[in-house]
Amino acid sequence: MAHPVTSTSTPAIDRPQSGLALGRLARRPESGSFLGMIAVLLFFGVFGGSGFMSAAGAASWLNIASEIGIIALPIGLLMIAGELDISVGAVIPAASLTAAIISGHYGLPDWLGITAALGLGLAVGLLNGLLVTRTSIPSLIITIGTMFGTMGLTLGLTVKIAGSTGVSLVPDPFTKEILGDYLGGMFQVTILWWVVFVVGLFWLLHISPIGNWIYALGGDKESARNVGVPTKRLSIGLFMLSGFSAAFVGVSEVMVYQSAQVLAGQSFIFNSIMCVVIGGVLLTGGFGSVVGIVFGTLTFSIVNQGIYFTSLDPNVGSVIIGVLLLIAVLTNDTFRQLALSYSSKKGGRS
Amino acid sequence: MNDKPAILELKNVNKSFGPIDVLHDISLKVRAGEVLCLLGDNGAGKSTLIKTLAGVHKPTSGQILMDGQPVTFVGPSDAQGRGIATVHQFGGTFPLMSIGRSFFVGVEPTKGWGPFRIYDRKRANEIAVRAVRDFGITRIDDGDRLVGGLSGGERQSLAIARAVYFGARVLILDEPTAALGVKQASHVLRIVNEAKRRGLAVVFITHQVMHAMAVGDHFAVLIRGAIAADFRKGEKSREEITDLMAGGETMADLEAQVEGYMETHEGHPPSPQVLEVPAAH
Ligand SMILES: Nc1ncnc2c1ncn2[C@@H]1O[C@H](COP(=O)(O)OP(=O)(O)OP(=O)(O)O)[C@@H](O)[C@H]1O
Ligand SMILES: [Mg+2]
């Protein structure tokens, strides 16, 4: 009985792939966002003048990038897994205030305030995860709900305990050094923490086997479950990761600015989602990369801060970001199509 | 003839989703070196039945026996770990993932140790590409290619190749030939026969009489979640089987009997022996 094998001119499987570098590059999720980042860098390099190019200029957008970046990474992972998390916008101030009330208002040790704040982030994440996996309500709605819940509780309890909507905290020298310091007088130490998050989540998504589960979950939840991916535990874990990261940013903020405000953090919701989408993550899940999210975050922050170095009206910055978002989605679509149709052997037969 | 040991056995299994009863009192044996064909109309419960065998669903009541011992599958990976590999009716592959990654979802090959185990991309790609090429899809030579770039049939072949690779003891195929061309479909049938020859138990769902006749040793017909007919190869003529599958007169007759029985027996379905299948015309 003949094996139904079509004749093939290149039967070898492990062929050298050198000539295909461009094709390989084109199918990476971050290709589009890399081009976008270069474009805005060039734009503000030219129109932002020497101020943008200086160390202080770089610090201004890197500081912004580090805070959004720490949140955008887990949001991106959630989005690859097919979920959204809006509640980060409330977890940031809730964590700031938890730390400020415990360590500032009550004067307890810093580590206690920090642990409680991070624990709060994990708890909100756990709640999100449980609600999302136990009901059929979309995570967008659930996390909007938990956002308002967290916000209301934060406001109510803060006013009740501290008597105002802002609480200050003077961190002890060690805490200040690891979480709230400025390197060289201008670069927030948060930038280094961002690097830690990038390395950690790069490992999780692209090197450890768990990354495979995240893509599978976002690609086809049903099939992922059928082949034995622990989809519920994975979703819950990812929500806890984003809750933790948001709380971490909240803690860093209170250590840097030495005060916590109830209404800080709302801007992070849209901004982090924009960074992720500009970074090439597919809104409906299943596609994206950590490097892309980093490029997206940098692009966003460069525009966000670079605008102040130009003679343009700062409001133009928002317009640029809006346009950038649309262009990003379009080019990322194109790159994804390229990736899908890409075959190392052109003009396949049979 | 019935001396082959049952690898998997369902005993009086019921399955309901909330208020919806899908499987009624299913008792079935899946024997080593035998192909069990599950036949039945759309919505009869075939997929639900094999999902119970694959560890996706837990029976609401009743028992699953493996090698004569009662087992409870914790989840699909538990069943997979015991050598039960399944190709589910829809999906099974992930369009935006690479061929290698898609092939190994849930059972990723790793290198390194402990918490530093990392996904072994090279090995995954090699094995996946070899498996699909063995399947006759020789157009594929790059495990980094995205699955979504393959044709529907190629994707299905990939899913089947995966199951064949992981199915050490039981191979469950839910309408595996639905999207396939003639050549690939006949290849699937050959794979099924080969698996049977190697002593695997195969559960095969199809709506195509020719395919069922070509490989089946043992046939079970599901009607509304109950086993309405259970017979071996040669016990019924091709016409009768066709009729059962096509929902023809015989089918209509059985259906009426099942309904009548369930009405008078508080919703319990009859055992297959109770039903009288009219002789073929
Ligand atoms: N998770 C579920 N929740 C509720 N009802 C379900 C669920 N899964 C299946 N059903 C119902 O069980 C019945 C049997 O479905 P099943 O998929 O097993 O049919 P099938 O025999 O495989 O049909 P087909 O030939 O169309 O594939 C259908 O009525 C379906 O609606
Ligand atoms: Mg089905």
Image (cartoon, grey):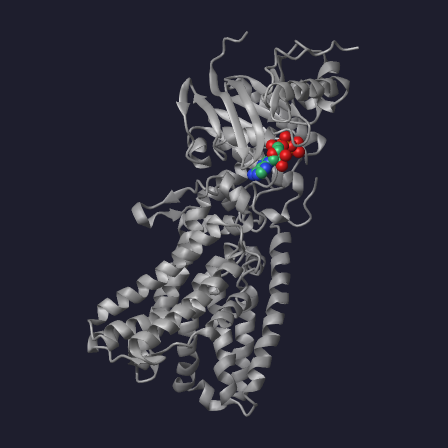
- Ligand 1 occupies quarter: top right
Q: B58 or B154: which is nearer to us?
A: B58
Q: Position of residue A267 (x, y in %)?
A: 48, 75
Q: Is residue A245 above or below residue B82?
A: below
The residue lying at 28 percent from left, 65 percent from top is: A116
Q: Is residue A134 left or right of residue A188?
A: right
Q: Position of residue A315 (x, y in %)?
A: 56, 86
In which image quadrant can residue A249 be found? bottom left
Q: Is residue A250 above or below residue B91?
A: below
Q: Is residue A189 visible?
A: no
Q: Is residue A330 left or right of residue A295?
A: right
Q: Position of residue A122 (x, y in %)?
A: 35, 59
The residue lying at 47 percent from left, 50 percent from top is: A133
Q: A169 or A323: which is nearer to us?
A: A169
Q: A149 or B6: which is nearer to us?
A: A149
Outermost residue, bottom direction?
A311
Q: Is residue B163 visible?
A: yes
In which image quadrant can residue A19 be found? bottom right
The residue lying at 43 percent from left, 61 percent from top is: A74
Query: Which quarter shows the C terminus of chain A?
Result: top right
